[in-house]
């Protein structure tokens, strides 16, 4: 039962207004004494030409109160108190009947959404910033798919550009083939850094590198083969991270995919009279929008990151006919995306308005040991493994006899990191702190997973007694708070979609865990002889576990039955 909708319909009927228009003004009051839903009547004072207090008093009289304990006027507010036993019964039964699909819908049916996320650079480490993009993108993918959208996850790999000329040169000159096999990215990074050091002393190296890249662009066999090797080796390493995270893509079309698709784009820009030569480079001027020009081709004719993004946007529109096209990329690229979207608009593509940059903040380290490793880059895979090891240590201390410790440490250790990334609004910076992240209490992944396992352990130890559940007996403050939170899942999902903010779902999961623990600390289940009460509580625990599982799934975490 969708109470918000019912409240809106009842008000609509009583006030002779469209329920649809009322729906978005309905609030959830901050304190239970103020009811479960509230409507601020000043929203109607214009149309009804009456003072808000008068409206609320009249509506309180007139409104159909079926299914509600009472409907009261409090100043300009109309407060609705739901009939708790009906609400409780309907909520729990709905959750248990819908199971893994509780909270899902067909809201996005027929709408395609492309999600460009993760997108690390070949031959470079998969670093902490890329986990930010990966975690947000993966979560948005799951949330939107859950609501019926068809998502296309795209890993826009950084696998093209002049740096590959440098890499080819460096490979020929300094590469240790054995090391390359063992630790490909570390070795590629080493020779890349060496190239820069050497090129500082001898700038002619840059010309060499440019020549190699030109050969690569022209399709020369030797260079293409090397490039392919770098790409394959890197992907193999990235795959380890994706496996740990349980992340999949529908397309790995990276920048190189567009290497033969840029000419028509440049022609189109030119044919629309937008291409201007500036210092030898070909650019689109964006002064009017207070932005520096969008560079399409450098003086030497090489295409740019932006050129490839323009080609990619056109390709995606043509092939996926998207309703929205999301780019989950750090906020340091805000200007880049503004330039690309504005250029598309200038080219006459109004769908540029459906392209959205989903920005996020920086990752900082509170641990001195990590932050002082200057020059030495942090590999995400190492951090994930460290998190798994640290979780194992905690489990060995807390619950040494636990079965499949390995699997639990993996799900909890990896989950703890992902959770940290999705906990706050995405534009906020993250402070990476092991102790905080892995704590079993506080607003953490392990805390929510632990709450689930606690619920499951209750269900394993306690059997229902003969006779059904009597939901009217779940009448304590803690029980009703928990049920109300469980009922709010879809609402949280809707908010998270509105803002493309997985953190709304993350915080929701924390709220459920908190409400559950409050209930469990105040009430017991063992030893209850009243079958109606005991069975109702057990059903409520089962429903809680289900909702926790669904919410965690949406942010990319798995549950564990015991921990
Ligand atoms: N490879 C880029 C980086 O690591 C991110 C690419 C984002 N996606 C895009 N379509 N530009 O910074």
Image (cartoon, grey):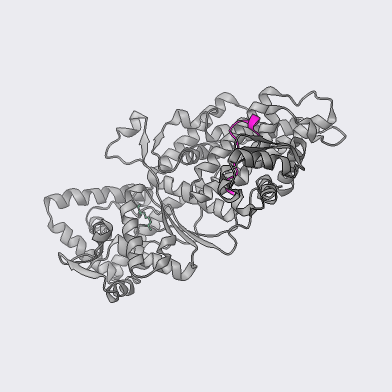
Q: Is residue 7 visible?
A: yes
Q: Nearer the viewer, residue 322 or 410?
A: 322
In the displayed structure, would residue 100 be above or below residue 440? below
Residue 32 belongs to the span the image colors magenta: yes
**Could you say where residue 502 lies in the image, as x and y percent from the top left?**
51, 45
Q: Is residue 463 visible?
A: no
In the displayed structure, would residue 462 be above or below residue 239? above
Residue 59 belongs to the span the image colors magenta: no
**Could you say where residue 531 lies in the image, as x and y percent from the top left?**
84, 30
Q: Residue furthest right?
A: 467
Residue at 32 percent of width and 70 percent of height: 262
Classify residue 261 by image quadrant.
Answer: bottom left
Classify residue 31 by image quadrant.
Answer: top right
Residue at 33 percent of width and 71 percent of height: 265
Q: Nearer the viewer, residue 314 or 438?
A: 314
Q: Nearer the viewer, residue 456 or 399?
A: 456
Q: Residue furthest front?
A: 49
Question: In the drawing, does residue 196 fall left or right of residue 355?
Answer: left
In the displayed structure, would residue 159 be above or below residue 2? below
Question: In the drawing, does residue 171 fall left or right of residue 10?
Answer: left
**Could you say where residue 482 lies in the image, as x and y percent from the top left?**
66, 33
Quadrant for ligand 1? bottom left
Q: Overall secondary structure of the magenta stretch? A: loop
Question: In the drawing, does residue 198 fall left or right of residue 519?
Answer: left
The part of the chain drawn in magenta is 24-35
Residue at 70 percent of width and 51 percent of height: 13
């Amino acid at each position: 039962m969708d109470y918000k909708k019912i409240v809106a319909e009842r008000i609509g009927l009583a006030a002779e207004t469209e329920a649809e228009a009322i729906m978005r003004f309905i609030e959830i009051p901050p304190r239970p004494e103020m009811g479960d839903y509230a409507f601020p009547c000043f929203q109607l004072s214009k149309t009804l030409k009456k003072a808000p207090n008068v409206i609320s008093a009249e509506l309180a009289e007139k409104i159909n109160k079926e299914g509600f304990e009472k409907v009261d006027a409090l100043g300009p507010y109309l407060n609705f108190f739901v009939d708790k036993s009906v609400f409780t019964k309907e909520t729990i039964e709905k959750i248990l009947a819908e199971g893994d699909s509780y909270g899902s819908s067909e809201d996005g049916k027929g709408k395609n959404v492309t999600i460009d996320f993760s997108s690390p650079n070949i031959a470079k480490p998969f670093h902490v910033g890329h986990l930010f993009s990966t975690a947000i993108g993966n979560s948005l993918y799951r949330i939107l798919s859950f609501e019926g959208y068809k998502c296309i996850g795209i890993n826009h790999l950084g696998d093209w550009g002049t740096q590959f000329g440098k890499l080819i040169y460096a490979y020929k000159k300094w590469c240790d083939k054995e090391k390359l096999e063992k630790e490909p990215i570390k070795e590629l990074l080493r020779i890349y850094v060496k190239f820069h050091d050497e090129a500082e002393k001898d700038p002619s190296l840059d010309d060499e590198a440019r020549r190699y890249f030109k050969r690569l662009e022209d399709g020369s066999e030797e260079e293409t083969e090397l490039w392919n090797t770098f790409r394959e080796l890197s992907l193999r390493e990235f795959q380890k991270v994706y496996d740990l995270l349980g992340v999949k893509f529908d397309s790995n079309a990276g920048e190189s995919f567009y290497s033969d698709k840029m000419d028509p784009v440049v022609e189109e820009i030119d044919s629309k009279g937008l291409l201007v030569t500036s210092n030898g480079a070909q650019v689109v001027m964006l002064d009017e929008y207070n932005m520096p020009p969008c560079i399409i081709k450098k003086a030497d004719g090489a295409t740019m990151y932006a050129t490839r993004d323009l080609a990619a946007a056109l390709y995606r529109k043509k092939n996926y006919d998207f309703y929205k096209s999301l780019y989950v990329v750090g906020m340091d690229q805000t200007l880049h995306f503004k330039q690309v979207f504005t250029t598309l608009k200038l080219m006459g593509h109004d769908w540029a308005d459906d392209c959205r940059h989903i920005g996020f903040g920086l990752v900082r380290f509170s641990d001195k040991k990590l932050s002082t490793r200057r020059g030495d880059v942090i590999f995400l895979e190492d951090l994930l493994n460290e998190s798994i090891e640290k979780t194992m240590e905690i489990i060995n201390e807390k619950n040494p006899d636990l079965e499949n410790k390995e699997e639990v440490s993996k799900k909890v250790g990896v989950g703890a990191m992902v959770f940290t990334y999705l906990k706050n609004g995405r534009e906020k910076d993250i402070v990476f702190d092991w102790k905080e992240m892995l704590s079993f209490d506080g607003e953490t992944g392990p805390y929510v997973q632990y709450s689930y396992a606690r619920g499951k352990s209750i269900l394993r130890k306690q059997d229902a007694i003969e006779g059904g559940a009597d939901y009217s007996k779940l009448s304590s403050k803690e029980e009703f708070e928990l049920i109300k939170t469980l009922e709010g899942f879809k609402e949280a999902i809707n908010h998270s979609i509105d803002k493309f903010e997985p953190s709304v779902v993350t915080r929701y999961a924390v709220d459920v865990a908190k409400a559950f623990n409050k209930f469990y600390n105040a009430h017991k289940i063992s030893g209850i002889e009243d079958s109606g009460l005991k069975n109702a509580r057990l059903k409520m625990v089962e429903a809680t576990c289900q909702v926790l599982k669904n919410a965690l799934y949406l942010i990319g975490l798995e549950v564990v039955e015991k921990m």
